[in-house]
Image: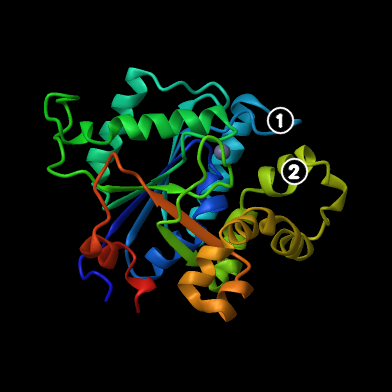
C-alpha cells in the first residue's frame, strides 16, 4: 500500500538532465501516487553544448528543466556552479546539507563516486559527506538538523571499477517509457543537439518534433535505460521471472548507500511499495 502521508523524493544530480536520464520511472511512479518529487542540479549545465555556452546555455537549460519537470509535476532547482568545474568543497557540502534538511526527503537519489564525469563524482562525494552530518545540530546550525538520515540510493551506471553497482532495487520501467521519453525530450539542447553530436550521430536526428521524439525513444533512450536493463538482466530475471525479466527493455536499478539510513523491510515497503503489489 502506498504511504498515506506524501513521501518526499529528492534527486541530487550534477546536471539538469541527469534525473530524467536515470530515474524517470521512479519519479513518475512517485508523482502518480501523489508524492512530492524534486530534483536539484548542482551545476547550471553551462558547458553541455558544442555551439552554445555560458549564461546563454544556462538560461536555455532552466527553460528545458521547467518543461521536463512540468510533464509529471515535479519541482526543480538549479544551482549556479559551473558545469565541468564542480569540486566537493566545504561550502558546497554545507549547501547540500541545507538542501536536504530543508526538503526533508524520505529518499535521496544521487550519483555513485565511480563515474566517468568529475561533476558526478563531486556530487556523489558531497551527498556522502552530507549523510549523517544532516543529523548533527552543530554542523550548519542556521538550518535545523534532521532527527534521522533519509535513505540514500545511487542511480544506476554500468561502470565496474573499482566495483559494479549492487542491484538492491531493480525495476522494470517499460510502462513509463513514453513519459520518461517525453521528459528527456524537453532537454532539447541535450537530447537532440549536444549528446548526438558528442556521440557522432547528429546526422541521424530527424527534424520534425514527432519524428525526433520517436527517434529518441527507439534509438537514444535504449543507450541509457536499455543499457541498465542489459547490464542487470540477471537481476531482472530473478525479480520478475524468466519471461518478463528477459523482455524488459527499460530498467532502473539502485544501490542503497551504507552511509545513510539502511533500507530495512519497513523502509523498503514504504519507499518501494509498488515492487511488492
Ligand atoms: Zn550529468
- Tag count in the figure? 2
Please indicate whether residue 127 sits to the left or right of residue 157 in the image: left
Marks 1 and 2 close (CB-CB < 8 Å) = no
**Residue drawn at (77%, 45%), measured in percent from left and top?**
196
Q: Pointer 1: what residue? A: 52
Alpha carbon separation for disc pair 1 and 2: 10 Å
Secondary-structure class at tag 1: loop
Q: Nearer the viewer, mark 1 or mark 2?
A: 2
Q: Is residue 170 above or below residue 33?
A: above
Q: What crowding class fits label 2: few (fewer than 14 Cα within 10 Å), some (14-19), or many (20 or more)?
A: some
Secondary-structure class at tag 2: helix
**Residue drawn at (78%, 41%), measured in percent from left and top?**
199
Q: Earlier in the sequence, mark 1 or mark 2?
A: 1
Q: Which quarter holds ligand 1?
A: top right
Picture quarter with the N terminus: bottom left
Q: What crowding class fits label 1: few (fewer than 14 Cα within 10 Å), some (14-19), or many (20 or more)?
A: some
Please indicate whether residue 192 sits to the left or right of residue 269 in the image: right
Front in this rendered view, residue 246 or 271: 246
Q: Is residue 94 above or below residue 258?
A: above
Q: Pointer 2: what residue? A: 193
Percent x, y of residue 110:
42, 43
Please indicate whether residue 122 sits to the left or right of residue 260 in the image: right
Percent x, y of residue 157:
55, 46
Percent x, y of residue 23:
49, 55
Picture quarter with the C terminus: bottom left
Question: Ligand 1 near label 2 (Cβ, under 8 Å)?
Answer: no
Please indicate whether residue 234 sits to the left or right of residue 92 in the image: right
Where residue 95 sits, quadrant-wise, is top left
Front in this rendered view, residue 92 or 45: 92
**Residue drawn at (71%, 30%), measured in percent from left and top?**
52
Amino acid at each position: 500500500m502506498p504511504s498515506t502521508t506524501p513521501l518526499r523524493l529528492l534527486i541530487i544530480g550534477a546536471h539538469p538532465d541527469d534525473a530524467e536520464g536515470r530515474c524517470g520511472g521512479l519519479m513518475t511512479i512517485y508523482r502518480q501516487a501523489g508524492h512530492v518529487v524534486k530534483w536539484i542540479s548542482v551545476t547550471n549545465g553551462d558547458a553541455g553544448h558544442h555551439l552554445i555556452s555560458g549564461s546563454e546555455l544556462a538560461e536555455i537549460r532552466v527553460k528545458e528543466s521547467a518543461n521536463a519537470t512540468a510533464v509529471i509535476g515535479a519541482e526543480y532547482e538549479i544551482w549556479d556552479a559551473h558545469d565541468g568545474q564542480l569540486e566537493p568543497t566545504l561550502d558546497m557540502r554545507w549547501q547540500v546539507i541545507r538542501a536536504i534538511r530543508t526538503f526533508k526527503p524520505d529518499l535521496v537519489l544521487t550519483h555513485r563516486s565511480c563515474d566517468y564525469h568529475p561533476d558526478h563524482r563531486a556530487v556523489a562525494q558531497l551527498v556522502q559527506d552530507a549523510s549523517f552530518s544532516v543529523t548533527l545540530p552543530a554542523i550548519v546550525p542556521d538550518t535545523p538538523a534532521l532527527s534521522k538520515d533519509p535513505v540514500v540510493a545511487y542511480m544506476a551506471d554500468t561502470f565496474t571499477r573499482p566495483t559494479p553497482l549492487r542491484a538492491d532495487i531493480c525495476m522494470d520501467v517499460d510502462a513509463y517509457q513514453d513519459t520518461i521519453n517525453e521528459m528527456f525530450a524537453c532537454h532539447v539542447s541535450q537530447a537532440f543537439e549536444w549528446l548526438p553530436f558528442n556521440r557522432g550521430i547528429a546526422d541521424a536526428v530527424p527534424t520534425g518534433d514527432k519524428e525526433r521524439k520517436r527517434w529518441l525513444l527507439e534509438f537514444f533512450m535504449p543507450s541509457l535505460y536499455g543499457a541498465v536493463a542489459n547490464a542487470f538482466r540477471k537481476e531482472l530475471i530473478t525479480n520478475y521471472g524468466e519471461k518478463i525479466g528477459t523482455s524488459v527493455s527499460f530498467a532502473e536499478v539502485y544501490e542503497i548507500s551504507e552511509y545513510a539510513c539502511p533500507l530495512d523491510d519497513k523502509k523498503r515497503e514504504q519507499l518501494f511499495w509498488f515492487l511488492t503489489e
